[in-house]
Amino acid sequence: SAKRKPAPIRRLEESVINRIAAGEIINRPSNALKELLENSLDAGATNISISVKDGGMKLLQIQDNGHGIRTEDLPLVCERFTTSKLKAYEDLSTIQTYGFRGEALASISHVSHLSITTKQADSECAYKANYADGKLVPAKPGGSCEPEPCAGNNGTILVAEDLFYNIPSRKSALKNSRDEYNRIFEVASRYAIHNAGVAFSCRKLGAPKTDLNTLQGATAITNIRQIFGAKIASSLVDIEHSDDHYAFRFKGLISSASHEMHKSVFLLFINHRLVDHTPIKRAVESLYTSVLPKASRPFVYLDLQIKPENVDVNVHPTKREVRFLNEDTIVAAITDCIHKKLMSTSSSKSISLQS
Ligand code: ADP
Ligand code: MG
């Protein structure tokens, strides 16, 4: 049989490259939301409202009261690798912001119709700009690309519409808007717990009530009560541990052994990022299995801080997975601490029952 001839190698068009890259960073509405929430928090917002249409596929809007975007930066803000947060590679090890790669807004602009309205506190009016494929575009065909002055509150409103309109395969994979809305709600409520004190709200556009509504100055436990209910909130005990030698510390709120839930809830923040870390999750869940009665599940909220030099957040484009040094030591310290706490709370319970 004749060998087939190789096809010629061609350079992909820039727009195709960008769209493929964008699809890896933003793979569903809840990813986009996470990036946008992190930007609002980086901007020092104390109030963040989310509005959603069709699970975020039709519309995802985030309004914050942060420091806004400099008007002269608006032409640049959606280009790939433009950021106000990182200057040199070395800064990565000490960076205090969520963002640093300048890819989120660019990615969103490559897979949706994006508009940004922003006002700095010392500026007289807000400016509104529209974007496609990383660049400013006119609001209406034939119009000017220039950001337009308009009325607005201090802070920033981002509106992403028709997500994945130009990636049909992705769009058709995300048909269930209730599912997508639940993921959005999950991301929003977890950030609300971890950033207790910042007011968060989340609603379906046009719905009479908000599904999430935390208050400025609230505590984590108040927000947990609001989101997960009084029964779970009242069963929580706190843990805390620090280790100077390995340069990590953590605190958390965990359900005590006596409490029974039917679904496990695991909120893990590493250096303030909502992440998945399977070894920690497995270790904690198996510890609970050995302590809790059958069929009940833990609630665990862990706020783990590791010296930034020891953490690699660049494992995955969505930054959802992280790796860090001394993993075994840290996992053992977490399970140890939880184990001790569960033992002490269950024995004090049984003592108080006997007396
Ligand atoms: P990164 O967060 O990695 O810098 P992004 O693409 O998420 O990249 O954002 C690009 C830049 O846009 C940020 O560095 C920041 O200067 C600005 N920005 C984005 N969102 C906001 C916001 N909500 N408030 C103020 N500035 C913002
Ligand atoms: Mg960002």
Image (cartoon, rainbow, N blue to C red):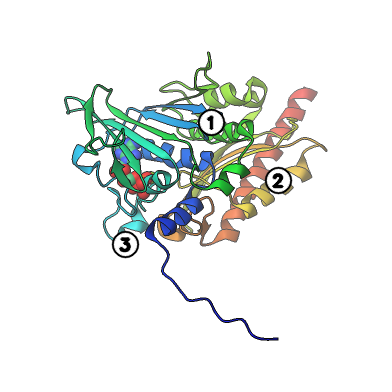
Q: Is residue 249 above or below residue 176?
A: below
Identified at 31% across, 62% down, the residue is 90
Residue identifier under label 3: 89
- Mark 3 or mark 1: whose residue is earlier in sequence: 3
x and y, in percent, of residue 173 in the image:
62, 44
Res. 244 visible in picture: no
Q: What element carries label 2?
A: helix
Distance Cα–Cα, label 2 vs label 3: 37 Å
Identified at 52% across, 48% down, the residue is 167
The answer as to whether callout 2 falls within 8 Å of ligand 2 is: no
x and y, in percent, of residue 262 in the image:
75, 32
Residue identifier under label 2: 285
x and y, in percent, of residue 62 in the image:
41, 30
Residue 189's label in the rendered image is 1
Count every numbered label the image shows and give the total.
3
View extreme (top): residue: 208
The N terminus is located in which quarter? bottom right
x and y, in percent, of residue 116 in the image:
32, 34
Kind of residue sitting beneath label 1: Ser
Kind of residue sitting beneath label 3: Tyr
- Mark 2 or mark 1: whose residue is earlier in sequence: 1
